[in-house]
Amino acid sequence: MRSTTEAASVNMGFSLYSLYDYGEEYGPEPCTKEEVKSFGSWFLPTFYSLVFLLGLTGNTLVVLLLLKYKRLKSMTDIYVLNLAISDLLFVLGLPFWSYFMADKWVFGDTLCKLISWIFQIGFFSGIFFIMLMSIDRYLAIVHVAFSLKARTATYGTLSSLIVWLVAMNASVPELIFSTSVNDSNRTECKLVYFKKSTTWKLFSCLEINVLGLIVPSIIISFCYARIVLTLVRCRNNKKKKAVKMIFVVVVAFFLCWTPYNIVLFLKCLDDVGILGQCEISKNLDYADQVTQILAYFHCCLNPVIYFFMGQKFKLYIKQFFENCIFSKIFCKSCGFHESFCSESSRSGYTQSTSDEETF
């Protein structure tokens, strides 16, 4: 059995970036994981960098467009803005973990705690806001009369504040236990629990799976099941489009996060000694590295899912780049700027102003 003084990370924040005890013992034979470490040192930094660039670009654009054109007048706008901010918090930690996986942790103990905490806040808040957006769609389509009173900017702001508070409190273990330590001549930023920390390991594992997958999955599935039933019964020319969007939202969420959460749960069982086989532990480490990239890539998909499939966002993109100073400088001389402006203006009159066209 592995030593209880060694801290193996079982939660989302740290199964990604550190976290393998490369000298663990399973019975009389030591379980060496140098090949796992070598694989992660080039595989993870590469994809962390890609997710960082795509997520930063897409979500920054979302924030700029919302603040410039939407004015945050509805609950939906507020949720989408907060979701983009959550994804930004999430991706901003990736350069640190990328450097750490490629070399070692060189940013000190304070940044280890702070970045780990912020990273975990971005994870929880992002999933919570996807859940709130599902509830928002549910109220707008299934309970139309009630939604007129409930779906206001005031309630949207209040519920968003509650989500941030819940996410910050759920991430407190990261702030407490994240530590920069020397392990086998390598400085690492990882969770270091108290001695005999089986309770905290199990708590972290259950917290990620319950708050990060099970509860949101139940709520999202209920909301969209009721939405589909409502749309099927009513006669609406936009029914097929709405059902398609719902399908994309649900499938993207489950495909990205379910494999990762399953692997985390299995790693939790391994960490507390229930599995206890070296080969299984190695395979779980490989699976963890692959599935976490899929899960993290979801933050890059959010701008596509919630905006690029809608006509309004295309209009905002046109208007944004039309007013961009570089567009004016490089395109005005060739006449493209004027034609682009006219096209955007004409398309603006044809767009629906209904809140349901947000996505």
Image (cartoon, grey):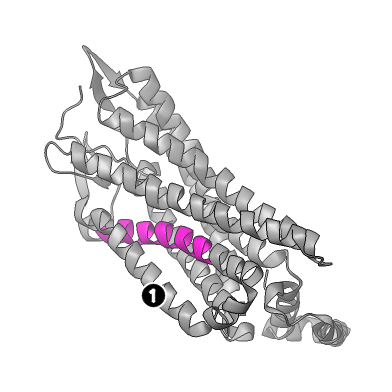
Quadrant in the rendering for residue 234:
bottom right
Quadrant in the rendering for residue 136:
bottom right
Q: Give the percent coordinates (x, y) of residue 73.
A: 57, 86
Q: Specify whether 169 is left or right of 197.
A: right
Q: Give the percent coordinates (x, y) of residue 54.
A: 58, 58
Query: Is 106 placed above or below 202 here?
Result: below
Query: Is 124 placed above or below 354 here?
Result: above
Q: Residue at x 58, y 77 (%)?
A: 147
Name the quarter where the N terminus is drawn: top left
Depth check, front residue: 276 or 31: 276
- Residue sticking out furthest to the top: 28
Secondary structure mostly taken by the magenta-highlighted segment of the chain: helix
Q: What amino acid type should be assigned to the residue bearing mark 1? A: Leu
Magenta range is: 113-132
Residue carrying label 1:
161
Q: Residue at x 32, y 38 (%)?
A: 19
Q: Residue at x 36, y 56 (%)?
A: 120
